[in-house]
Amino acid sequence: MDEASLVARLRGKEDAAFEELVRAHGGRLLAVARRFLRNEEDARDALQDAFLSAFRSIEGFEGTARLSTWLHRIVVNASLMKIRTRTRKPEALIEDLLPGFLEDGHLARPAVEWRTQSDDPIVRRELRELVLEKIHQLPDAYRNVLLLRDIEELDTQETAEIVGISPNAVKTRLHRARQALRGLLEPHVGKPSA
Amino acid sequence: MNCREFVEFLMEYLDGELPEAQVATFREHMADCPSCETYLDTYRETVRLGHDVCGDPDGPVPEDVPETLVSAILAARRKQS
């Protein structure tokens, strides 16, 4: 697909061009929204909001980034907006998911090695599903930072701007989110200690 | 340095942001504490597994966007314009 001509047709408000855009990018972008939103309906709403926003602002698309990158960013923003506006459910406290320490500073439960390497595509897929399930168990504020930094691969500054916190707070949340995710994964992938 | 401090400074160490003087202490602790060495390995593995959630080459090719959703998006656009 010639991106420049598609953009020109979108700017010309051609109905078929909007449909082409949704069909070409919708599946991949829905997968992005699902990473942020546990609920399928919320993910679909976020995707719809994102496309409507993209249709409205296509004039502002400068062509310096690829269309897919531009849309990706819009979907991430729409997903975060959805998280902010939806009814809040009780969440786990991050402190309950962090490692515990004894009074002398030693880890309360010694870390064990993991078995996460496999050549079997089915095992790898199951592991990927487990990781996503556990990411979804993180409190929103921590999950969002982890998704933006480790999965969407934004840098600290970009993440800080999107989430609306300082770069130092991004670093603190990311470190805590990774520790919490590690703790959630360990019972499933840790080798029994000898 | 104890395990609590080791875990606290772990991300800075991996990002190469830990001051030189503390790097030596960090590594000394790791050499003496197999549990913290394992903790570091599994923390790093956690980050790698996170990357794989969307970047696994074995991962499914994203499915087509559901037909009902395509229709809903296009209808909402017509309503909007």
Image (tube, rainbow, N blue to C red):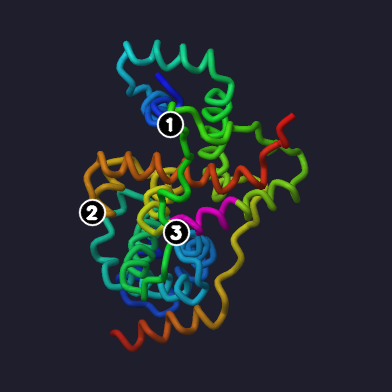
Q: Is residue A113 magenta?
A: no
Give SS at disc 3: loop
Q: Position of residue A107 (x, y in %)?
A: 51, 31
Give SS at disc 1: loop
Kindly identify the amino acid type of the residue bearing the numbered disc 1: Glu
A139 vs B75: above or below: above
Cα distance in 3D space between marks 3 and 2? 22 Å
Chain name for mark 3: A
Tell me what residue is drawn at x 35 percent, y 86 percent: B78
Query: Which of pointers 3 and 1 indicates the residue nearer the eye?
Result: 1
Tell whether B45 sits left or right of A118: left
Tell me what residue is drawn at x 41 percent, y 86 percent: B75
Cα distance in 3D space between marks 2 and 1? 36 Å
What residue would you read off at disc 1? A103
Query: Which of pointers 3 and 2 indicates the residue nearer the eye?
Result: 3
Chain name for mark 2: A
User: Mark on residue A164?
Assistant: 2
What residue would you read off at disc 3? A92
Give SS at disc 2: loop
Kindly identify the amino acid type of the residue bearing the numbered disc 3: Ala
Tell me what residue is drawn at x 52 percent, y 28 percent: B40
Cα distance in 3D space between marks 3 and 1? 24 Å
A131 vs A140: above or below: above
Q: Are marks 3 and 2 on the same chain?
A: yes
Q: Earlier in the sequence, mark 3 or mark 2?
A: 3
Q: Position of residue A62 (x, y in %)?
A: 26, 55
